[in-house]
């Protein structure tokens, strides 16, 4: 075959390749990406150096979410046609979508530089910087995007996020609020709230969270923060609403704490009692209710709760201490001594325990063990409990005189 024969064959192949590409584009337009892929692969096979065929093949692959293959075709496109804007933009976009932001920086930078008046490539470039922790560079790029498109809430959110990453929370508030005007970006405000909370700036965090009154989880968290910040009265409405939605033990405990902080003791006891109906074997609940009853000077029911706590945890020194105290104050001295004996057996006896022990023996008319306990108490306390020390010294003198008279 002569040279003219080879020429006509090459020309025919090019014509066929153009026809295949035209058919592939029509398939893409009619939302048939699988068919388009098949056609563009034929075009690539016919002319591997045809950057246009590779680029169109990447479009067909992208539509089918075959991102890895699409990325490879875009890289080939850029090798054949360096600096092709659409290829750089699409490649960067796909890399971002696949959490490969570090690889996306260069193609997106090149796309942004190729179209300096276009906001979108600059916005994507800024996102790649933000994702790779270059918050300062991202801030500058987002600001450029915002200047190019003053209505871009995505750019404002990007500025806010970049400032937040730099720890500039007061400066971030404005851009975040501007972005939140768009319902699609409203939830992003919670990021700023969490950042304020992590920085221990609770009032600022609460102010953000209160912009989500319909979000039950956020509303409950606000109440918890208010409770921790000694704003119990403000927390009560949200905690009461949470109980209606979910009468869980955790919610009842939180509401009980708020009631106690606001001196609504009876309401607090009701919540603790209701919680105990759900979890009668809950040690902490028994202790909480017992302490509320103790503070109300209702020693018999308080002792009942502490006794149940001891039953649940026989080696619990705090429960034994509370039980002994409630019993002795209620003048149940023998039972109180029994609880104190258990504390002693655990090796956890305190000066206060010695005082209660002495007082109990004293009231039970057992002067010698009472004197021994008072003396041990005075030796152990060393000025830390002045009122009890005064009382103990008085009783030591009196008991010693009484014992001398009996000799």
Image: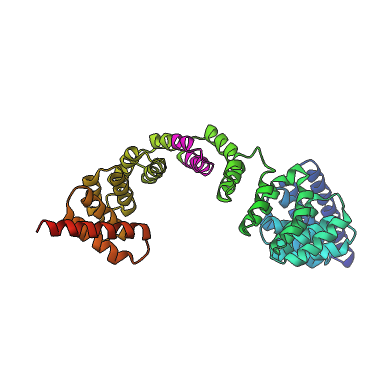
Left/right placement of residue 362 relative to residue 4 reads left
Q: How is the image coloured?
A: rainbow
Residue at the limit of the structure toward the top, as seen here: 244
Query: Which residues are drawn in magenta?
Result: 250-271
Q: Residue at x 17, y 54 (%)?
A: 367
Q: Is residue 50 visible?
A: no
Q: Residue at x 88, y 57 (%)?
A: 147
Main structural element of the magenta stretch: helix, strand or loop?
Answer: helix
- 183 versus 37 height, above or below: above
Left/right placement of residue 84 relative to residue 221 reads right
Q: Quadrant of residue 164?
A: bottom right
Residue 193 spot, x, y in % from top left: 66, 52
Quarter occupied by the C terminus: bottom left
Q: Residue at x 51, y 38 (%)?
A: 264
Q: Quadrant of residue 83?
A: bottom right
- 112 versus 233 height, above or below: below
């Amino acid at each position: 075959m002569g040279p003219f024969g080879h020429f006509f064959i090459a020309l025919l192949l090019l014509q066929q390749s153009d026809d295949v590409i035209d058919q592939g584009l029509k398939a893409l337009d009619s939302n048939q990406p699988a068919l388009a892929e098949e056609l563009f692969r034929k075009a690539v096979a016919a002319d591997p150096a045809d950057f246009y065929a590779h680029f169109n093949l990447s479009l067909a692959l992208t539509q089918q979410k075959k991102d890895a293959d699409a990325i490879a075709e875009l890289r080939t496109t850029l090798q054949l046609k360096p600096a092709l804007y659409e290829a750089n933009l699409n490649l960067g976009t796909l890399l971002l979508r696949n959490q490969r932001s570090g690889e996306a920086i260069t193609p997106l930078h090149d796309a942004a530089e190729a179209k300096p008046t276009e906001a979108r490539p600059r916005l994507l470039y800024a996102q790649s910087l933000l994702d790779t922790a270059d918050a300062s560079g991202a801030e500058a790029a987002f600001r450029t995007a915002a200047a190019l498109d003053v209505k871009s809430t995505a750019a404002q959110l990007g500025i806010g996020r970049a400032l937040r990453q730099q720890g500039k929370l007061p400066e971030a508030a404005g851009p975040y609020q501007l972005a939140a005007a768009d319902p699609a970006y409203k939830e992003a405000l919670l990021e700023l709230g969490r950042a304020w909370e992590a920085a221990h700036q609770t009032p600022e965090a609460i102010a953000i969270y209160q912009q989500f009154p319909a979000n039950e989880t956020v509303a409950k968290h606000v109440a918890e923060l208010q409770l921790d910040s000694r704003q119990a009265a403000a927390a009560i409405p949200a905690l009461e609403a949470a109980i209606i939605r979910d009468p869980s033990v955790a919610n009842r405990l939180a509401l009980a704490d708020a009631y106690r902080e606001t001196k609504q003791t009876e309401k607090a006891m009701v919540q603790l009692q209701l919680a105990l109906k759900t979890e009668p074997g809950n040690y902490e609940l028994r202790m909480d209710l017992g302490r509320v009853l103790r503070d109300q000077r209702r020693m018999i029911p308080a002792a009942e709760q502490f006794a149940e706590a001891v039953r649940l945890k026989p080696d619990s020194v705090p429960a034994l201490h509370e039980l002994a105290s409630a019993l002795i104050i209620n003048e149940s001295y023998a039972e109180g001594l029994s609880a104190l004996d258990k504390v002693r057996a655990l090796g956890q006896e305190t000066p206060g325990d010695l005082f209660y022990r002495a007082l109990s023996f004293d009231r039970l008319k057992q002067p010698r063990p009472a004197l021994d306990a008072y003396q041990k108490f005075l030796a152990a306390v060393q000025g830390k409990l002045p009122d009890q020390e005064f009382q103990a010294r008085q009783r030591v003198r009196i008991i010693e005189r009484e014992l001398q008279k009996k000799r």
